[in-house]
Amino acid sequence: MKINRRMFLGTAIAAYGSLSSPMVSASGHGKPRVVVVGGGAGGATAARYIAKDSEGAVDVTLIEPTRTYYTCFFSNLYLGDFKKIDELGHSYGTLAANGVNVVHDWAIGVDRNAKTVRLASGASLPYDKLILSPGIDFVEGSVEGWTLASQNAMPHAYKGGSQTELLKAQLMAMPQGGVFSMVAPPNPYRCPPGPYERISMVAHYLKKHNPTAKIIVADPKEKFSKMGLFQEGWGDNYSGMIDWIGADFGGGNVTVDPDAMTLDIDGERINVDVCNVIPAMKAGHIAEAAGVTDGNWAPVNAADMSTKADEDVYVLGDASQQGDMPKSGFSANSQAKVCANAVRGALTGSRVFPARFANTCWSLISTDNGVKVGATYEATAEKIARVDGFISKTGESAQLRKATYEESEGWYTGITVDMFG
Ligand SMILES: Cc1cc2nc3c(=O)[nH]c(=O)nc-3n(C[C@H](O)[C@H](O)[C@H](O)COP(=O)(O)OP(=O)(O)OC[C@H]3O[C@@H](n4cnc5c(N)ncnc54)[C@H](O)[C@@H]3O)c2cc1C
């Protein structure tokens, strides 16, 4: 089924209805206040839905340092020359015009007793409900030789914007016959097919501009998302170009030297022209600062995405530890709508609908060659639990692959409108 913008929004509206019950003052000081930290797939969606559906009954403030959010989703297509960087950038103007108080700043601390969020500017914002959707940060020392200070020499490009542009510039500057390398991340990490779609898009670029170049992937995993589909696609389209070294062959035993531009895989040193290091991940730092993580991720209740540590603090998207959903933009958006509905219900007495979640991850392998994996989920007492799912098959017709790619284009338009209005 092709998802177009109208269907996407229509489904969301049908699922959440309209405000029907009178406002219940939770705070005792005027309108109830929601502070959302992080204006990405989870945070922007939650802010937008609470503001829209509460029809002014709830004060919604969104804290986000950047003025333009560059999506990680479709950033690989920018590497492959299928998208321009400007097509990935989205501003917060429409959210601001529709009742969300957008504050461009960093949240640097949370006082859960006083129920306030401290900003880098020095301001302190009170909340009745706090929603954190800060995405990911990296685990220090997870790739030997790499620190955040190395990200210019060896970019991760796993946060959107300047890092993605840097990786593209390095790809374009590669000498003929050069080596593009990737250090793939261990589980769990954002966007399970992301590194492998990236390899496909880099190969697509190199095949056209630098056909004798090589790609080496050092991977600490033995298997990865949509592995059969990617390997089929790499064989069909980029034969002889990609060398994937999994855990069985020492792919997890890696050291990098950003000054010398070398990569050691299981004791064998190679000179590389580009090294895309994607380290191990954990929840964005503010979740840890709020004291709602287990050290890496924030355990949440599936029914409303409230944290196990504090029922008035919610964590969405990549930063949460919720169960079976992959860390994706689609998941974060889906979780945000469940959370928005629950938060609005708690603050205004409006009807709360049972939590239902969905995800699809599309990947582009070559021109018009799209594949997908997806599932639906429900909330159980323990976790967000998978109900059923689907995945593209190897050997599919070119026509079906093209339709799958077009479906992903419709999804991108739909989700970005759903996030930013
Ligand atoms: C290469 C790549 C490809 C991908 N492709 C897909 C795809 O095709 N489909 C898909 O569904 N997903 C995809 N993803 C995954 C998707 O980007 C993430 O899962 C999604 O963005 C998670 O949403 P989030 O709200 O948790 O975090 P984000 O969208 O990263 O948003 C976090 C926001 O919080 C802000 N922030 C962080 N800390 C603070 C703070 N202290 N104060 C204030 N603001 C803060 C950040 O600036 C950021 O804007 C891809 C990811 C990558 C890297």
Image (cartoon, rainbow, N blue to C red):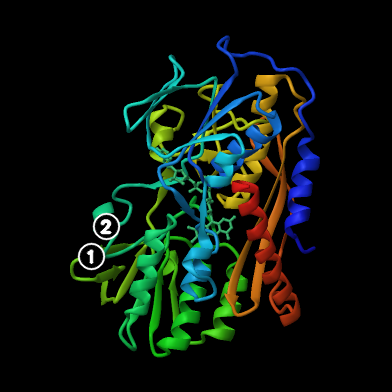
- The amino acid type, in three-letter code, at marker 2 is Trp
In the image, 279: left or right of 308? left
Position of residue 255 relative to residue 239, above or below, is: above
Badge 1: residue crowd in 10 Å (few <14, some 14–19, many ≥20) = many
Percent x, y of residue 211: 43, 89
The tag on residue 146 is 2
Q: Residue at x 51, y 87 (%)?
A: 239
Q: Residue at x 41, y 63 (%)?
A: 164
Whether pointer 1 and pointer 2 mark residues with C-beta atoms closer than 8 Å, the reply is: yes
- Please indicate, yes or no, whether residue 278 appears anywhere in the rendered image: yes
Percent x, y of residue 149: 24, 54
Percent x, y of residue 46: 60, 37
SS class of the residue under badge 2? loop
Position of residue 195 relative to residue 274, above or below, is: above
Q: Residue at x 44, y 46 (%)?
A: 136
In the image, 56: left or right of 125? right
